[in-house]
Amino acid sequence: MRRLGLDIGDKRIGLAVSDELNVTAQGKEVLIRTNHRADLKKIKKYIDRYNIGEIIVGLPKNLDNTESRQGEKIKNYVNFLRNNLEIPIKLWDERLSTRAAEDMLLKADLRRKKRREVIDQVAASIILQNYLDYMNRHNARNSGEGNNNE
């Protein structure tokens, strides 16, 4: 089962997909938002094309761990997705992911216009990669429990 990472903004949605082993995240594209139904149709195509079993959505928070104003919009959109999709959707703390994406693109020496075109895709990839790394560390720790007595 692959995972789909979403970086949802007011105007764009960045998409990233994990590999089949859920080790790496690859940015795929940026959807220009039109309306909820059209966005949903495009997201469903990704779910079908990549056999997605779980969606990870970046939840923006303030540095003091309080929810940002944008966070409420994201939660409302996630509720819409949950009401229209039959796969699990998890919220994942995305603090500083856009900043990390910007830094990465600046280091790659991309022009401002090109950065603007791909930043949401890169942010979705960072969000999904952080989630995958966490889950893989968590699973590795749990698979080692109880094996010390052998």
Image: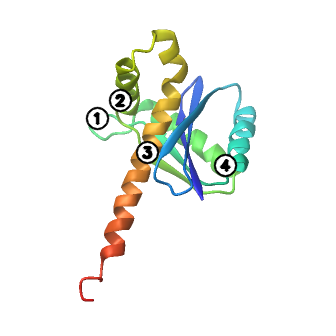
Q: What residue would you read off at disc 2?
A: 100
The amino acid at mark 1 is Leu
Q: Residues within 10 Å of mark 1 (few under 14, many from 20)?
A: few
Q: Nearer the viewer, residue 81 or 143?
A: 143
Q: Residue at horizontal 41%, vertical 22%?
A: 105
Q: What residue would you read off at disc 3?
A: 129
Where 142 sits versus 54, above or below? below
Q: Nearer the viewer, residue 147 or 36?
A: 147
Disc 3 vs disc 2: Cβ atoms closer than 8 Å?
A: no
- Dot 1 or dot 2: first in sequence order is 1
- Dot 2 or dot 4: first in sequence order is 4
Q: What residue would you read off at disc 1?
A: 63
Q: Residues within 10 Å of mark 4 (few under 14, many from 20)?
A: some
Q: What residue would you read off at disc 4?
A: 50
The percent position of residue 49, horizontal first and vertical second, equals: 71, 47
The amino acid at mark 3 is Gln
Does the rendering let one see residue 59?
Answer: no
Quarter placement of the C terminus: bottom left
The amino acid at mark 4 is Tyr
Distance between the Cα atoms at labels 4 and 1? 34 Å
Identify the disc placed on residue 140.
none
